[in-house]
Image: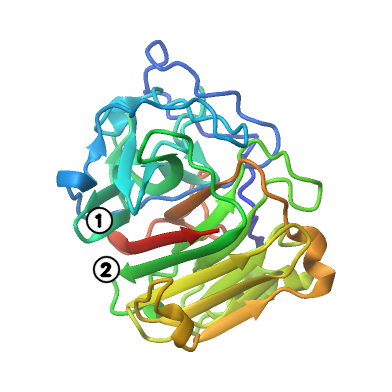
Amino acid sequence: MTCTIKLDGSILTDTKPLTSLPTSSSPPLRRVPASPVQLRYLGAGTYFEPAGAAAALDTPSETSSTSAAGCAAPNFTPLPDKCGSPTCLVTFAGYQWWTEYNFFPPPTYFYNNNNAWAPKNVTVDAEGLHLFVQQRDLGGGLTWAAGEAATALNLDGSVADLGYGTYLVTAKVKTAASWSVLDPNVAFGAFTYERDRTGDANNPGRELDLAEISRWGRASGTPCRISPPSLCSGNAQFTVQNWDAQPDNLHRYTINAVDTITLVMRWTGANQPVTFSQYDGAYTLDTVGAATPANTWTTAPDQNPFVPSNGCQQFHLNLWMGDFTDASGGYNPPPNGVQEVVVTNFQYSR
C-alpha cells in the first residue's frame, strides 16, 4: 500500500463533523476557504495550568483590529470553553499566541487534516510553551487530539506582524529520550502560514517550514510505504512550499540523539534564498552565531519562485498525528501514549 502525504495541510472536503458540539452558541470564526490551510495537531500529555506572567489571558488587551501592514486580528470568541479562557490566548516569548486556530464553522469544528485539535493541548508555564498529543473531550467524548499555537498579538494588544527576518525556536521533547526516537506517528512543526492564502500560485499560503520533525508513521526498520519515498529517509525536514512542485523543495535530514534542539530560519525577502539550520542544544540569537549547525540547508536559485513575499502570515508551532498511511475513519492513528514537546524559546528579529 502506498500513501501520499499532503504536507500543505489541505482542508478535506469530506470532513468528519464532531456532531455533538453545540451549534447555536458558536458563531463562525470565518468561512472555511476552499483552498488548503495549514493543519495543526495537538497531542496527549500532562496539562499545565498557566501561572503568573505566562498565564492565558482572560481578555485581550486594548487591541488594534489590524496591524500596520493591514493584517486583521483573529476572531477570539468561537468556543472559549474549549480553551479555558475567553480569548484562547496564551502569552509566551513576547507574543500572545492563539490556541484555537483549527476551529472552523459547523460541521467541521475542531477537525482538520485527519486530526482533531484541542486548544487545551497548548499550555504555558515557567518552562515554556507546551504542545501535547493527548485525549481531550471536544464535545463528543474523549478523542485523540493535536495542538497548535499561532502568533496573534503583541504584548500591547496590537496585531503581531512577523515577516522577513531571522526566526529561532528552541524545543525539547519531553516524552522520548531524544528527537531521534520521537513516536513515529507524531509530527512537530514550526513554520509561517497565511490562512487566507493571498500569496502567488507558487506558494499561496506564504509557508516556510523551519521544522517538520516526523517519520510520518514509519517505524524504524520497517518497509517504506510512503510517497514520495524520500520521506522515509531521516527524521526531519526543511521545506519551502509548494513542497511537491519540485523534488528539492523538501530537504530531509536526521536529528541526532539529543532531546533539545534549536532551529533557525533566515528569510531575507521574496524570491531570495532562505537558510534553515538545526543545532543540537539550546541557543539564542546572541549565542547561535558562534555555534556549528548539525544540519543546514540554503535554497537554490531555482527555488526562488517558491520563496514568498511578506503578507499576513503568522508563525505557528504544532504537534499533531502524521501517519496518513494507516488512517482509519478519517483520522490518523494515535501515538503510543501521551506525547509532549516544550518550546523553551522563540525569538524573531528583523
Name the residue: 59% across, 33% down: 71
Quadrant position of the C terminus in the picture = bottom right
Relative placement, left or right, of 63 versus 200 is left
The answer to whether any part of residue 194 appears in the image is: yes
Question: Could you tell me which residue is drawn at 41 percent across and 74 percent down?
Answer: 286
Image location (x, y in percent) of residue 314: 54, 46
Between label 2 and label 1, give the one nearer the viewer: 2
Counting from the top left corner in percent of width and height, residue 334 is at 39, 56
Identity of the amino acid at label 1?
Gly
Amino acid type of the residue that numbered disc 2 sits on in the rendered structure: Lys
Q: Position of residue 263 (x, y in %)?
A: 47, 71
Query: SS at mark 2?
Result: loop
Residue displayed at 67% across by 50% down: 206
Q: Is residue 189 above or below residue 107?
A: below
What residue is disc 2 on?
174
Residue 350 in the image: above or below residue 99: below
CA gap between label 2 and label 1 equals 9 Å
As helix, strand or loop, the secondary structure at mark 1 comes to loop
> Is residue 118 shown above or below 108?
below
Answer whether labels 2 and 1 touch (C-beta < 8 Å): yes
Pick whichever, 273 or 255, lies toward us.
273
User: Is residue 50 visible to the viewer in this orientation of the structure?
Assistant: no
Q: Position of residue 189 (x, y in %)?
A: 49, 60
Numbered badge on residue 45: 1
**N-terminal-most mark, 2 or 1:** 1
